Structures are given as structure tokens and as C-alpha cells.
Amino acid sequence: MAETPEEKEKLHVDYLVGEFLKYENHHRARFKEAREIMDNWDCVPPPADEDWMNQVPSPATLEAEQTITPRMFTALFPNL
């Protein structure tokens, strides 16, 4: 048994760290999936895994959106 307060504190810290690591290892897949969903919400671009993928992020400008949107609408709904 721990006799001094420092020894008791070390035992408590070791126990808590061990329990948290067990919890984290058990839910690792869930945490990874949640991280991917949060990255999508935060507009984090997906990793460029292939050499041919664009390495420079280039968001669409307002002018590009104004040009593309009517064309897509016409392509999707030609009779309207």
C-alpha cells in the first residue's frame, strides 16, 4: 500500500490513465469514424492518396459557382 500522499497520487494517476487507455482502445473505431465526420463538417479536404490528385486546395470561387450552377440545373432539369 502507498504510504505517502505522493505515492497515493501516483497510484490514482496510473489507474486513471490505464482506464482511459482501455476505454480509448475499445472505442477506437468509433472515434475514427466520428473524426472523419467532424472533418467533413469542418470542410477539411480528404487526404490526397494518389500522385495525380491536386495537392493544392482550390475552392470554387463565387464566379465559378455562378457559372456552374445554371448549367448543372439545366442539365438536371431540361424541361423546366
Image (cartoon, rainbow, N blue to C red):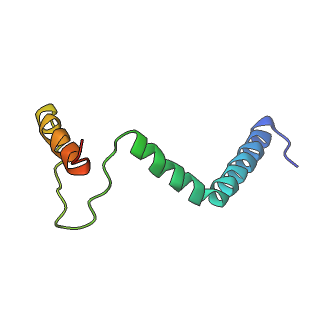
Residue depicted at x 25% and y 50%: 76
Position in image of residue 12 (x %, y %)? 76, 43
Residue depicted at x 17% and y 57%: 54
Farthest residue in the right direction? Answer: 1
Q: Is residue 60 something one can see in this rendering?
A: no
Question: In the rendered view, does 78 fall on the left or right side of 23?
Answer: left
Position in image of residue 43 (x %, y %)? 34, 41
Residue depicted at x 79% and y 35%: 5
Q: Nearer the viewer, residue 46 or 17?
A: 46
Farthest residue in the top direction? Answer: 62
Question: In the rendered view, does 56 fall on the left or right side of 6?
Answer: left
Q: Is residue 54 above or below residue 39?
A: below
Q: Nearer the viewer, residue 80 or 56?
A: 80
Residue depicted at x 30% and y 49%: 45
Question: In the rendered view, does 3 fall on the left or right side of 21?
Answer: right
Farthest residue in the front direction? Answer: 79
Question: In the rendered view, does 72 fall on the left or right side of 12?
Answer: left
Query: The C terminus lies in which quarter of the figure?
Result: top left
User: Which image quadrant is residue 59 in?
Assistant: top left
Position in image of residue 72 (x %, y %)? 20, 46
Q: Is residue 44 above or below residue 27?
A: above
Position in image of residue 26 (x %, y %)? 67, 60
